[in-house]
Amino acid sequence: MEPRETEIDRLLRHSLAAPIPSLPRDFDQRLMRQVRRSSQPLDRYRRILLTGYGLISVVTSAVVMRGQGLNWGAIAVMILGPLAVVAAVPWARRATYTTRWRGAK
Amino acid sequence: MESDSQLVARAQSGGQQAFAELVSRYRAPVFRLAVSILGREFIPEAEDVAQEVFLKVHRAIESFRGEAEFSSWIYRITFNQAVNLKARVRFRSPHADETVLYQAVSPGPGPYLQAETAQRDQALAECIQTLPEVYQSALRLYYWLGADVAEVAELIGVPENTAKSYLRRARQLLHGLLKERGYSCD
């Protein structure tokens, strides 16, 4: 180490000396409780209900938009566009994280 | 002892015990990395980051293909999560007053010297904050959290020689920054 580095090394060792923190003892338990809660699959009834609601919404939207004079192409874009954006968000976030990680280095 | 890839494979099949084992294995280094990025004034936020990281890992583990090591993957998630949070907490007041933290470790013989040392330590902390994130993290891991160079390299995801040069470069930059502020490092 160069002399000036030795000086700053000593300064850092003194200045940054502090108790090392640790996670609370119950961290694992709290985390696994949350994991178990988020892992519970929707029961069959709720899945059917949500799927039915989604389909009825799409059909109703299509009928209303058709009644307003929109053609089928425009209706398809209006209904499928937001779904495509929602599906693409996880991919975009993964790409952003990878770029940030590489950029930070 | 099962390897990370074996535990990941079991966790991907829905094995919660395997995931719990991964949590147990990585909770400490994930937390240390989060703390090294956020700083000692934001310990509760570092705990939140650690929790959020494991929840993200749990949600995304099925899509983990094993192209990189599991450790590299989780440390990358931790780094990004902590940096994102840091940008948000930057303008909030820290939980503990910084001057109290620095005065607590200043052993100078008299009140004047103690005050001078505390001011220099505060200037040092401010200078550290101006360094690139990886330099800050490397410094805190090495000088505060007691990591050796190999562990610093693993946590921030670079080869050992790169970690050594980060530390060297950080020290050189700090030396210059302190001198600009009129502080001697002697």
Image: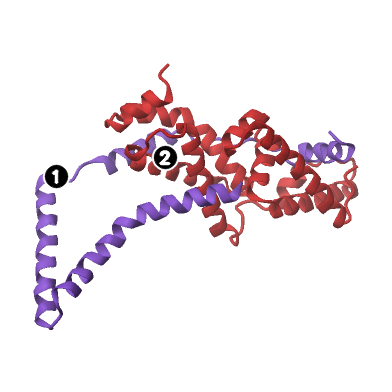
Chain colours: A purple, B red
x, y percent for residue A31: 38, 38
Q: Which residue is at the front of the view, B153 or A69? A: A69
Residue at the extreme top of the image, as rendered: B1
Q: Chain of mark 2?
A: B
Give the residue type at disc 2: Phe
Residue under the point 51% across and 51% down: A99
Please name the residue shown 37% across and 37% down the image: B64
Residue of label 1: A43
Q: Which residue is mark 2?
A: B54
Q: Nearer the viewer, residue B132 or B106?
A: B132
Asked if residue A60 lies left or right of residue B130, the reply is left
List x then y, in percent, for residue A86: 30, 59
Q: What is the tally of numbered marks visible in this picture?
A: 2
Callout 1 environment at 10 Å: few (<14), some (14 to 19), or many (20+)? few
Circle 2 sits in a helix, a strand or a loop, which is it?
Answer: helix
- Give the residue type at disc 1: Asp
B130 on left or right of A96: right
Q: Quadrant of residue A49?
A: bottom left
Give B10 or B92, whichever is nearer the viewer.
B10
Residues beneath discs 2 and 1 located on the same chain:
no
On the question of residue A16 being in view, the answer is yes
Inspect this view and state whether residue A25 appears. Answer: no
Disc number at residue B15? none
Instruction: Depth check: give the residue in front, A61 or B145.
Output: A61
Quadrant including the N terminus of chain A: top right
Compute the Cα span from label 2 to label 1: 25 Å
Which residue is at a point 67% across and 46% down the rendered structure image?
B136
**Chain of the residue that carries numbered disc 1 in the rendered image:** A
Above or below residue A22? Residue A98 is: below
- Asked if the residue under mark 1 is in contact with the one under mark 2, i.e. CB atoms within 8 Å, the reply is no
Please state the horizontal and vertical placement of residue A57, each as a whole percent of the image.
Answer: 13, 66
